[in-house]
Image (cartoon, rainbow, N blue to C red):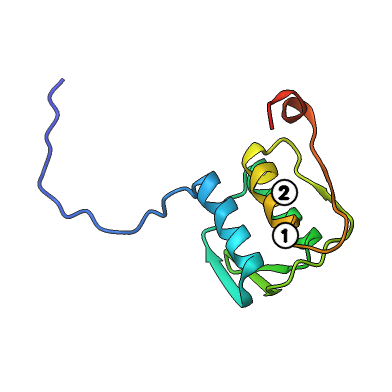
Amino acid sequence: MIAVIHPSVIKGMIPAPASKSMMQRACALALLHTGETVISNPGASQDDLAAISIIQQLGATVSSKNGQLNIHSTGMINPSGKVDCGESGLSFRMFSAIAALSREEVVINGMGSLMERPM
């Protein structure tokens, strides 16, 4: 077999997949920020979805539009009483410290393998 390759120009854009840990950190910062935060190309892993759920449980408003995540926060931690971290170890560690900023009692839950890890 003979393959012929001709010179050509390659152009375009390929969005890089979102980093799980960076997405969780961006959610935490958005929760602590007063105002609106826009995250472009947000991740959709279970850990990312857990982080989004957690910031909502801690008082942020989250909406999604045109591939962007819009997060509005007062900068104050207003917990709903319980925070569910799923199996996300980073979320558990990071958001437990953030939840401690609240004057209210917050119960932090995990599930699966998270319950067997040292915390």
Give the Cα distance between marks 1 and 2: 11 Å
| 36 vs 118: above or below | below
Decide if residue 98 is on the left or right side of residue 8.
right
Nearest the camera: 47 or 45?
47
Mark 2 element type: helix
Decide if residue 104 is on the left or right side of residue 16.
right
Q: Residue at x 66, y 66 (%)?
A: 31
Q: Residue at x 80, y 32 (%)?
A: 111
Disc nearer the start of the sequence (1/2):
1
The label on residue 31 is: none
On the image, the x and y values in percent for residue 37 come to 58, 72
Decide if residue 60 is on the left or right side of residue 18.
right
Q: Residue furthest bottom?
A: 35
Mark 1 element type: helix
Determine which residue is flagged by label 1: 55
| 113 vs 6: above or below | above
Amino acid type at circle 1 is Ile
Decide if residue 51 is on the left or right side of residue 25.
right
Determine which residue is flagged by label 2: 96
Nearest the camera: 15 or 19?
19
Q: How crowded is mark 1: few (under 14 residues within 10 Å), some or many (20 or more)?
A: many
Q: Which residue is drawn at 11% across and 34% down?
A: 4
Marks 1 and 2: CB-CB under 8 Å?
A: no
Amino acid type at circle 2 is Ser
On the image, the x and y values in percent for residue 45 come to 62, 43
Q: Which image quarter holds the C terminus?
A: top right
Nearest the camera: 101 or 32?
101
Q: Quadrant of residue 79?
A: bottom right
Q: Which image quarter holds the N terminus?
A: top left
On the image, the x and y values in percent for residue 110 come to 79, 37
Q: Which residue is drawn at 49% across and 50% down?
A: 18
Q: In which quarter of the image is residue 29?
A: bottom right
